[in-house]
Amino acid sequence: MSVGLSGHAEWDRIKKRLRAELGEDVFNSWFARVDLESITDGAVHLSVPTRFLKNWLQNRYRDRLLALFQEEFEGARQIEFTVRSAIRPRTPGAAVGAEPYDGPTLDPRPVAQAPQPLKVQREAVFAEVRTDDALYGSPLDPRYSFDTFVEGRSNSLALAAARRVAEARPGEAVGFNPLYLHAAVGLGKTHLLQAVARAAKEQGRRVLYLTAEHFMYRFVAALKSQSAIAFKDGLRGIDLLLIDDMQFLQGKQVQQEFCHTLNSLIDGARQVVVAGDRPPVELETLDERVRSRLGGGLLIELHAPDLDLRRRIVSGRIAAARRSYAALAVSDAVIDYVAENVTSSGRDLDGAVNRLVAHNQLTGEPISVEMAETALRDLLRVREAKRVKIEDIQRIVCKQYNVSKADLLSSRRTRTVVRPRQIAMYLSKTLTPRSLPEIGRRFGNRDHTTVLHAVRKIEDMIKTDRAFQDEVDGLKRQIDL
Ligand code: ADP
Ligand code: MG
């Protein structure tokens, strides 16, 4: 027997108790993004967004969680954690496919998503590049260097800035501090940050690369063991701090600490580089001071790769795979096919090449365009299904609430128009990768704060009103068709 239980009263009660036991900060750091998936034959299945979080919860909180579940559900025997699929966004707010890089995880997707042999194969391809220099910072992936980063129009500015930071001598001001890189998932932020970290380390600079999650983890751990002062001193002794996946920094105390660190490093002419999936103004949960300090440096957006860049990334990947499989033969036609069809990100291009190689190694079938069509079919279908347009959202919302599109985009403030407008904005933010300012423009040139207000309003209503939640879910289903 299996029951879907997300959002149910028992789980809410368990979370409430954890929050009371651990305090707001610790709770938000570890449990805010845990979902209850199901309880099957006594096994409680919880899902989390990253492997890092999975390990952390497993080691620290498994027993406590089990005890709490046993109080709510007779017969609960064990707790199992899974890393959520990149395909299924957890909350409406989570970017589709956004799984943060959180360690030497070379396969960004959980095992369940690919057939087992493929996974084994992929590990074999990259086994030799695993490293473990996690003693201090987060581990660096040896594949992520400047040498392997392919330059194109969409990333040349970010690359130039990253190189400039990497080449600076200790104490030399490069003129932009902090450097803040932002882009949707898979466009090379982590690659660039790690390339900078690696190059600067090689010059003997004291470098610390941390994911925001890792930063929280270290800070909370230091608080617990009362070594927070040593931790802070340690941070101040470095030349270059790189923080990845900034959007995951949560908790008031952690943010305050981060803000202090940021200020003292920058004031001391040490370089800071930060990457996030959106610009600082849109990091809605972030403390205002952190946001403005981050926004005060150089902001650079990486864009989606164009066809030419995609082609060169694919070629580079194939050349790398050939180091393991000397006999690998891939024609230009196949490279073109992949570059033309896998259009979203470097991560997907990677995934595509891995699939082709795995398919070839497992079946012995030569890599032709026909073979690529088959091997990549589900990858491409999933991508296609996800493209939701703001126009579609507006059309469906208008129909549902019987308002005209002109009214929806107008400045009219009557209740009958305001609510559907807010819902449409909320759906645009959660179902498309569009930014708040962009959505504002598409809704009669409104300010991004208006959109943000709408998103929060609808989120609150969904949380407190079950019927409303069903209504919004119904709309989502219509849009997804
Ligand atoms: P992000 O951190 O922005 O989500 P990553 O840096 O993890 O993205 O990139 C995803 C994958 O795509 C990585 O394997 C990375 O090496 C590859 N990639 C992205 N952009 C490039 C590029 N310009 N050249 C080479 N590889 C790239
Ligand atoms: Mg990343």
Image (cartoon, helix red, strand yellow):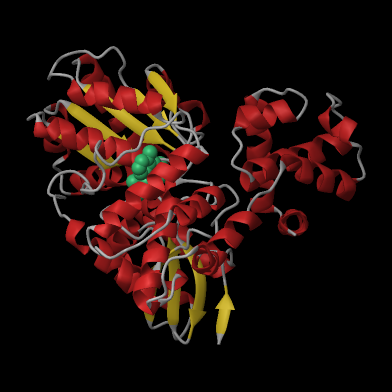
Q: Residue at x 31, y 36 (%)?
A: 192
- Residue 387 spot, x, y in % from top left: 65, 49
Q: Quadrant of the C terminus?
A: bottom right
Q: Residue at x 31, y 16 (%)?
A: 176
State left or right for residue 316 relative to residue 441: left
- Residue 32 spot, x, y in % from top left: 45, 53
- Residue 169 spot, x, y in % from top left: 13, 18
Task: Name the one closer to the observer, 437 or 259.
Answer: 437
Looking at the picture, does residue 336 appear above or below residue 127? above
Would residue 186 be visible to someone looking at this image?
no
Q: How many marks?
A: 0
Looking at the picture, does residue 395 appear above or below residue 338? above
Task: Name the one closer to the observer, 124 or 430.
Answer: 124
Would residue 119 be visible to someone looking at this image?
yes
Q: Residue at x 21, y 13 (%)?
A: 173
Ligand 1 sits in quadrant: top left
| Residue that sits furthest to the left in the current view | 204
Q: Quadrant of the N terminus?
A: bottom right
State left or right for residue 324 relative to residue 276: left
- Residue 445 spot, x, y in % from top left: 73, 22
Task: Quadrant for residue 395, please give it.
Answer: top right
Task: Name the one closer to the observer, 69 or 347.
Answer: 347
Task: Name the one closer to the observer, 420 or 108.
Answer: 108
Task: Quadrant for residue 370, please give it.
Answer: bottom right
